[in-house]
Image (cartoon, rainbow, N blue to C red):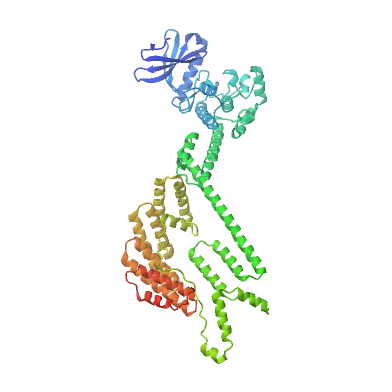
Amino acid sequence: MQIDQLILGKYRLLEYLNSGGFSSVFRAREEMTNRDVAIKALAKTAYPAGRMKFLLSEFQAMSKIWGHPNIVSIHTVEPGTDDYVAWIVMEYVEGKSLHELMQEGSLSLTDTINIGLDICRGLKAAHAHKIMHRDIKPQNILLTTDKQAKVADFSIARIFGETTEFAETMAGTRRYMAPEQHYGSYDYRADLYSTALILYQAVTGRFPFSGENKEMDKKKAAGEIEEIDRCPEVLRTFLQKALHRQLSERHQNASEMYDELDRIRRDEYVKQASQLIDASVNSSNPRLAEALERYRKAFRLPLEVAERMNQNLFFEQRRKEENNKREKLVAQIHQHYTLATRYIESQDYMAVFEEVQKATRLCLDDQGLIRTVDNVFRQLNITTPPLAANPTVEEIITLIQKLPDNENAVLRTWLDNQELTREEVETDIVPIQPQVKASGSYRTVIEEASPEFLLDQVHIDIQYPHEEEAFHIFQKIQIYQQQGRMRQCHTLYNKLGKFYQKQARNFAKADNLELVANCYTRSRFAYTVAEKFRLARKNAKNGGIYYTRLGRQFELQRSWEEAGKSYILAAFNHSYANLPALVEECHRMATVCYFNAAESAHLNRELQIAYDYYMLIMMIGEKMSAPTKVVSEAQKLISEIPVQS
């Protein structure tokens, strides 16, 4: 046959590809469809009457598995003419054979694993139809341009019947035969052994058994794999099992071999993806998602599998970060308590209070609790430190020396007045007024944090089962944010908004006002980020209504501070819902509640607490269109409280 010859009236020969003992293969163009095909020309001289059964075996084998992506497909079989018994028209694989690729050097671990998985897929399909290939070798593994492997040439395949699954005729290429193929009575596992041989050769660039035929056969039978340390470590155990001299110790079917290779592939992906994710922790990496996608494609992992693995990696990273943060926190707290213990031994009680206060602040993440703790320690600091039952003059002098300058001045004034008569003291000495610390200008504008930040804060402390479920959604959001996948983030924020809205309705049936209001507010935050503004305003309005009801409940219990907080949160929600009249009313109620709390503290001489409440009332008053009498009364009373300069 000649190049450019038209055969059978419809195939034009374009290129000679290769030949074997029984056939020659050409690249041709099908004239009617203009597609490239491979044509295998079977010579009559190679197929006398006694060999026709092998030809029929190949046809029967291929008819059962046509169309599988990892097996070279046969389009049709044309009857032969002249010197040829038949023409097999096959899929043309536009790439190299594995043999040709291996001539260029050893393959990467990723390519080797992917090719091994492709071969196993092809063999799974063939073995499922009781077809044993019997001639797996690099020349019979064809690769597409993107290195997808296809098993070719089933010319000596063995099709098993219903009663037997063992072959007895020695057939195949001796170099790539399993040990048992030389002695007869072998089965599908011989194909798996041959697969392991070519994978070893692909990744190392050498054959695992050296020597001529007989010497090589002995080494295979003895299981003497040479220089196994040339293999990447992750493949060594796999290959030692796959090339074991004992048949029972090897992979027992193609599915088992595929599963182990797939596990190695996933482990390698996790290792590389984990390194990439860890490297991006302390740096901004907007292309993290792109890099992970490149790894996924390199390992040919399905998208849903890779995403699940990525999520597990991000969860693990976050867990590590939280554990590290917790360990640092414990170390810092331990350091403060160690110092406090030393200060107790030296009777430096002011320093003890200071260290305990620092340790306590580290344990809290709620600003309200931190302010309460600071107030407690502030009161402790102005209380006279304990002295011995019979203090010495030196101890008293040491204590006086530690007093601040302003308190020293007060002490001197008191000592000077001791020279007066008791009557003069009773009539002339003005009682010493405790002083408070200024809380800063109440005109400072407190800017509202972003809803993303607020959601992050509320999910730090998990108290209820519904918060646990919401936290899992929020973790996925954070993973997508790190990957730069904002569309998926918005979808999950919308899901989080629906979740909290549903929880609010459930808690409403149980009349749990605090959780209802809380869930409606969180739903508002989530819908805002998802840019579902109509739903965000609707949930903000509901949150305002329930916080108002909660505030009235606290008023009946005379819990003034809690009532004030509830009204402020109600105003916060009504403001977002653009309901100015309700905002004004909630601010008015908040000032009344805080004034009651301030008045109670003032009467009990808890001046710092009273001062802070008055300042809060004045700050709220600045947001009101018409400040009430309560605001002006707070401004008057705060002027009567002495403030440290």
In front here: 436 or 123?
Answer: 436
* Number of on-image labels: 0
Instruction: Using the rendered view, name the quadrant where residue 572 is placed.
Output: bottom left
Judged left or right of residue 523, residue 327 is: right
Q: Position of residue 54 (x, y in %)?
A: 51, 16
Residue displayed at 49% across by 59% down: 464
Q: Is residue 414 above or below residue 372?
A: below
Q: Position of residue 441 (x, y in %)?
A: 42, 68
Q: Is residue 365 above or below residue 25?
A: below
Judged left or right of residue 361, residue 589 is: left
Instruction: Using the rendered view, name the quadrant where residue 589 is placed.
Output: bottom left
Quadrant (top left/top right/bottom left/bottom right) for the N terminus: top left
Asked whether residue 55 is in view, the answer is yes
Q: Position of residue 299 (x, y in %)?
A: 50, 35
Asked whether residue 159 is in view, the answer is no
Residue displayed at 41% across by 19% down: 37
Q: Position of residue 43 (x, y in %)?
A: 47, 10
